[in-house]
């Protein structure tokens, strides 16, 4: 493993080329569930600087990341090479969720040059990266990328803003551990 001072050109190129990544967060203390979520879709992740990244968080069945970030801010992103030379890059840092109801949301959303659709975005996850490392990835399998799924985008196209607000109140009010997620829930 090698620790890097920043997200430099080579690492940035690798990160931006990956069609998916994993997000890990955990609540404070010994109780609660550690959460790992796969993320993807072209245009939903952006490197904003040598120590800052962000991704679009769409409405979904859970909201563990948001609950954990509001509690302690800790987050790790992992990018794996499923094609080409083996590599794994981890970005450790502190993040914040900026929900669609926050006035700063629109400004952050504007930093994504080509998102697939922003209607179903419930928050932007804004991360200050404090540690950058890469490792061999020798055991990561080689897999073929066929393309992004459009099911999430299509499901949100059928919902109004009011429907999405109700979804947050009903399905995303608390994490699986009972931690609050949104102030407007």
Image (spheres, rainbow, N blue to C red):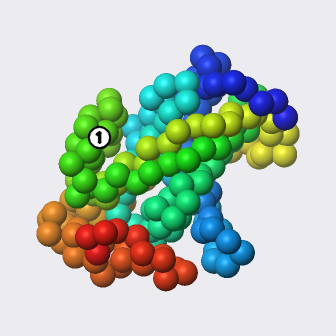
Classify 63 as above or below 133.
Answer: below
- In front of the other: 122 or 30: 30
Classify 92 as above or below 31.
Answer: above
Instruction: Tally the marks.
Output: 1
Residue 175 position within the rendered picture, expressed as x and y whole percent measured from the top left: 48, 76
Q: Residue at x 26, y 62 (%)?
A: 156
Residue 59 position within the rendered picture, expressed as x and y whole percent measured from the top left: 35, 63
Image-based side of 106 in relation to 160, left or right: right
Q: Residue at x 60, y 60 (%)?
A: 25
* Residue 121 seen: yes
Image-based side of 102 in relation to 14, left or right: left
Quadrant of residue 87 within the rendered picture = top right
Q: Quadrant of the N terminus?
A: top right
Residue 65 position within the rendered picture, expressed as x and y whole percent measured from the top left: 50, 62
Which residue is labeled 1 in the image?
A: 109
Q: Residue at x 23, y 58 (%)?
A: 101
* Residue 77 seen: no
Quadrant of residue 84 within the rendered picture = top right
Q: Residue at x 55, y 60 (%)?
A: 72
Label 1: how many Cα within 10 Å (few below 14, some 14–19, many 20+): many
**Secondary structure under the numbered disc 1 in the rendered image:** helix
Classify 123 as above or below 113.
Answer: below
Residue 185 position within the rendered picture, expressed as x and y whole percent measured from the top left: 29, 75
């Amino acid at each position: 493993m090698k620790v890097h001072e920043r997200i430099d050109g080579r690492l940035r190129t690798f990160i931006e080329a990956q069609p998916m990544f994993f997000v890990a967060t955990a609540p404070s203390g010994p109780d609660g569930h550690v959460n790992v979520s796969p993320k993807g879709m072209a245009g939903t992740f952006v490197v904003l600087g040598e120590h800052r990244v962000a991704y679009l968080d769409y409405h979904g069945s859970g909201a563990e990341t948001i609950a954990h970030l509001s509690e302690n801010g800790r987050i790790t992103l992992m990018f794996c090479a499923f094609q080409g030379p083996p590599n794994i890059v981890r970005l450790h840092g502190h993040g914040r969720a900026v929900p669609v109801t926050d006035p700063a949301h629109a400004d952050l959303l504007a930093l994504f040059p080509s998102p697939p659709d922003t209607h179903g975005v419930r928050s932007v996850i804004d991360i200050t990266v404090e540690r950058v490392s890469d490792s061999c990835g020798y055991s990561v399998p080689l897999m073929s990328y066929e393309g992004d799924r459009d099911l999430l985008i299509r499901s949100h196209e059928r919902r109004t803003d009011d429907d999405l607000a109700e979804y947050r109140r009903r399905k995303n009010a608390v994490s699986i551990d009972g931690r609050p997620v949104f102030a407007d829930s």
